[in-house]
Amino acid sequence: MAKPKIAVIGKGHVGSAIGQGAQRAGYSVRTTGHDPAAVREAAAWGDIIVLAVPGPAREATVKELGDVTGKTIVDPTNLIGPNFSYGGDLRKSGAEQVQDWAKGAHVVKAFNTNFAETMATGKAHGETIALFVAGDDAGAKKQILDLGRDLGHQAVDAGPLQNARLLEVFGFLNIQLGMGPSRYGRDIGFRVVGIPAP
């Protein structure tokens, strides 16, 4: 079976890492920056759309995607507030906002608990780390779990999209551990011990 085509919207560290990792794993990938015509074209081409844009740009970018009915949209963003504070909301995740804006699409939360430095390989200091994947559509979630495994991650089904609220807090913890007072660096990650291998 052919692997799904991946459109990466955003050419920053996250978009570049996911795109490079996916290409290495044998996926067809198109990457575009912030050009509305190119965004729409890439979104029309891709089966999976990775929304690798800054949090404040998500809504406008989703509008630029065009018709996304039936497509899988991956939201890897973490919402950061003033003075490097947590900018999310436990009552509604950023990924659930994307689902509201992207009617007809299947939004999946993934990659937000990892730094870009580990996304392409699923490795931190040579150890396999977890990719947590939350979503409501079983088929879309399986696509991203498969992608995670193909990149080298321990792919972890994190439940429904509502659990993105928890993953976004977890992602902020990762940022604080790597870049906050502890300064453990960006080559760190988590792994779940005790779950069965795929």
Image: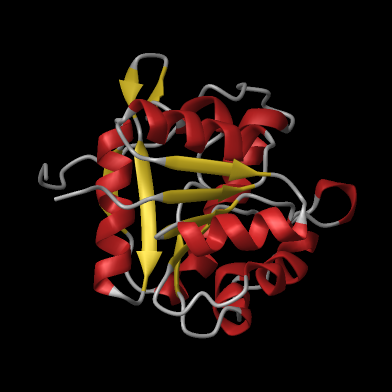
Instruction: Tell me the residue at 30%/32% (across/down).
Output: 26
Residue displayed at 63% across by 29% down: 178
Q: Is residue 92 left or right of residue 60?
A: left
**Residue at position x 44%, y 70% from top?**
163
| Residue 141 is at least partly visible in this image | yes
Of 108 and 61, nearer the camera is: 61
Task: Let me know if residue 87 appears in the view.
Answer: no
Q: Residue at x 53, y 31 (%)?
A: 17
The image's colour scheme reads secondary structure
Quarter residue 67 falls in = bottom right
Q: Is residue 16 above or below residue 169?
A: above
In the rendered image, the residue lying farthest to the top is 126
Left or right? Give the position of 90 relative to 150: right
Residues 73 and 56: in front is: 73
Q: Position of residue 74 (x, y in %)?
A: 49, 59
Q: Is residue 59 above or below residue 153?
A: below
Numbered label tally = 0
Measuring from the top left, give residue 176's x and y in whole percent. Answer: 67, 39
Residue 98: x and y in percent read 60, 73
- Which quadrant: the C terminus? top left
Q: Is residue 62 above or below residue 37?
A: below
Q: Position of residue 196 (x, y in %)?
A: 10, 46
Residue 51, by quadrant, is bottom right
